[in-house]
Each structure stands twice: as C-alpha cells, then as structure tokens.
Image (cartoon, rainbow, N blue to C red):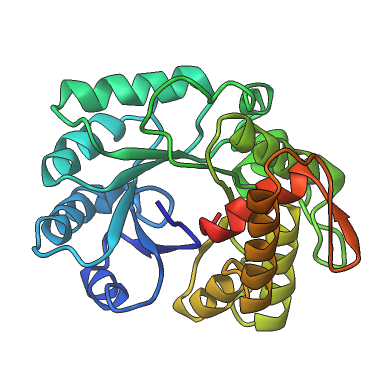
C-alpha cells in the first residue's frame, strides 16, 4: 500500500470530504476525533459512513476513530465498519495491546480487511511501547506519530524551538517511531507540518523525513499534498541509479562488494535500491 500523502478531512464537513476526493493524496483520513466536537460526533459518523458507501471508491479512505478508551469508540466502529473503510487511524495507541484490542473489535464486527495505522506517541506510556508493534496483526500498514497530545499530556510549554524544530523530547518520539515502524516491517509515516502557509518549510521538513527513512507524511491542508508527494517520490536519477545497483548484483550474484560509478556498493546499497524501485 503506497502512502506518500494522507490528508486529514473533518468528518462533520461533508462538502470538504466530497471535494477532497478530487485531490491527489494517496489516502484521505476522515476524522471523527480532534476536528469534531463532542456534540457533532453522531453527525460526523453519518457523513463519513455515507461517503464510504459510495461506489466506485476512487481513493483509499481511512477513518480516524476516537481513542479506544473513550466513550465514542464503540459508536465510531459500529457506525463506519459496515461501510468497509480501507483503514482505521488509531489515536493514542499504546503498542501491541492497543493494536490487538482494535483487531479483535474489528473481527467482532465482521471486518477482516481494514488496515490499522496507529498514532503511536500521544501518551507518555506509549513511548515505552514503540518496539512492540510487530507480529501482532497483518492489518498494520504503518506507524505514525504526533507531538501535540504528548506535549499537552506532560505539561510542556512548547514542543518546538524558536527555529521551528522539535525540542529533544519530541525528536526522541520521532526517532523511536521511525525505528519502531521499521522493526515491525511497515512504513514510517511522518507527522503533520502545521503551518500550511509555509511551503518552503514544508518542503524542507518533508525532505528531512524522506532522508531519515520515513516513507510518507500526513497533511492538514490540500495545498500540502503536491509538496509531500514530490518529497516522497523517487526522482528519475534515483531510480536509474537503483536499477544500476540491482543490475550489478544480478550480474555478480556471488559478490559481496562491487564498484559502481567509482564508488563501492554492498548489501545495504542493494537493499535501499530495491526499496526505491518498489516505491518504498
């Protein structure tokens, strides 16, 4: 499942969800959580379900439910699961236990196909479970993170320095998400860039994510989609170089180290080349 860009859309705004279907995001996240007030939850569920039941489906549609321990979770799932969303975004996930809990709830509702994308760093306890996502369920399609709920939970004055970069505690959260996702064998998805009026800052942030090993990124505004897609799409130069590496090892299957274009290449280079050719 290719997930370069995932756009959040408020679930209680059917006109926005309708319009978002025409955007070039790889997936939409129809939100039932933070962007929807308590009094609008029922209306949002109905609107999201209506969109999910439309055929043919032209885009992957995820639903961000409310946290599993909230009073809204059961109604979220019983409303939207019969409409077969492509995936569930799970906020305030806390490792294997949360993943297994949601998997069991989905099976109890008769669903065996919806994927799960946990937001894995929104509580202090979650930080100690980031290495536990592997081997729980085949539904896991990635791991992503967020800093806002985490900073609120610990009473931090801010989660960013004056230059806009995350402070060290949140860089730790980002790093552990990256390694936790790869340890589980799924893509790491970068968190949102909140200033949608700053395309240059977004481009730099997305480029750092790609550089560090993230495969995609969440978006909060349609204007961010093209920048994110570009950042997480291999260039023609990268693809050509990856093909050369794969071809070189195919021609020399017993070799551990080869020389290509004046540089030494070995098994890690081959692994990265294969990932590039597979679209991450």
Height in image: 234 above or below 102? below
Height in image: 274 above or below 98? below
Q: Position of residue 77 (x, y in %)?
A: 22, 35
**Residue 141 visible to an observer of this rendering:** yes
Left or right of residue 46: residue 24: right
Q: Position of residue 36 (x, y in %)?
A: 35, 55
| Residue at 21 percent of width and 23 percent of height | 107
How many discs mark residues in the rendered view? 0
Q: Quadrant of residue 116?
A: top left
Height in image: 251 above or below 109? below
Left or right of residue 7: residue 58: left
Q: Quadrant of residue 150?
A: top right
**Residue 190 visible to an observer of this rendering:** no
| Residue at 51 percent of width and 55 percent of height | 278
**Foreground residue, 261 or 37?**
261
Query: Which quadrant, please, contains the C terminus?
Result: bottom right
Q: Position of residue 219 (x, y in %)?
A: 51, 65
Q: Quadrant of residue 55?
A: bottom left
Left or right of residue 115: residue 171: right
| Residue at 34 percent of width and 62 percent of height | 10
**Foreground residue, 191 or 112?**
112
| Residue at 67 percent of width and 73 percent of height | 202
**Foreground residue, 231 or 14?**
231
Height in image: 161 above or below 133? below
Q: Position of residue 273 (x, y in %)?
A: 66, 55
């Amino acid at each position: 499942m290719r997930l370069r860009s995932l756009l959040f859309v408020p679930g209680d705004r059917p006109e926005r969800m309708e319009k978002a279907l025409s955007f070039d995001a790889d997936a939409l996240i129809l939100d039932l959580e933070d962007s929807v007030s308590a009094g609008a939850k029922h209306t949002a569920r109905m609107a999201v379900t209506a969109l999910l039941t439309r055929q043919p489906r032209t885009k992957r549609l995820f639903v961000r439910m409310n946290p599993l321990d909230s009073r809204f979770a059961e109604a979220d799932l019983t409303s939207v699961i019969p409409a077969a969303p492509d995936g569930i975004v799970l906020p305030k996930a806390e490792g294997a236990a949360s993943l297994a809990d949601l998997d069991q709830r989905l099976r109890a509702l008769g669903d065996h196909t919806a994927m799960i994308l946990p937001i894995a760093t929104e509580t202090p306890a979650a930080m100690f479970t980031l290495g536990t996502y592997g081997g729980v369920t085949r539904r896991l399609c990635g791991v992503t993170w967020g800093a806002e709920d985490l900073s609120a939970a610990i009473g931090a004055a801010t989660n960013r320095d004056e230059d806009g970069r995350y402070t060290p505690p949140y860089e730790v959260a980002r790093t552990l998400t990256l390694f936790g996702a790869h340890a589980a064998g799924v893509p790491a998805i970068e968190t949102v860039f909140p200033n949608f009026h700053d395309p240059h800052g977004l481009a730099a942030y997305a480029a750092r994510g790609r550089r560090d090993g993230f495969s995609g990124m969440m978006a909060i505004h349609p204007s961010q989609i093209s920048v994110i897609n570009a950042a997480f799409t291999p260039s023609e130069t990268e693809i050509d170089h990856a093909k050369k590496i794969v071809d070189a090892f195919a021609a020399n299957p017993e070799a551990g180290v080869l020389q290509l274009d004046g540089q030494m290449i070995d098994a890690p280079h081959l692994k990265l080349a294969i990932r590039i050719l597979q679209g991450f």
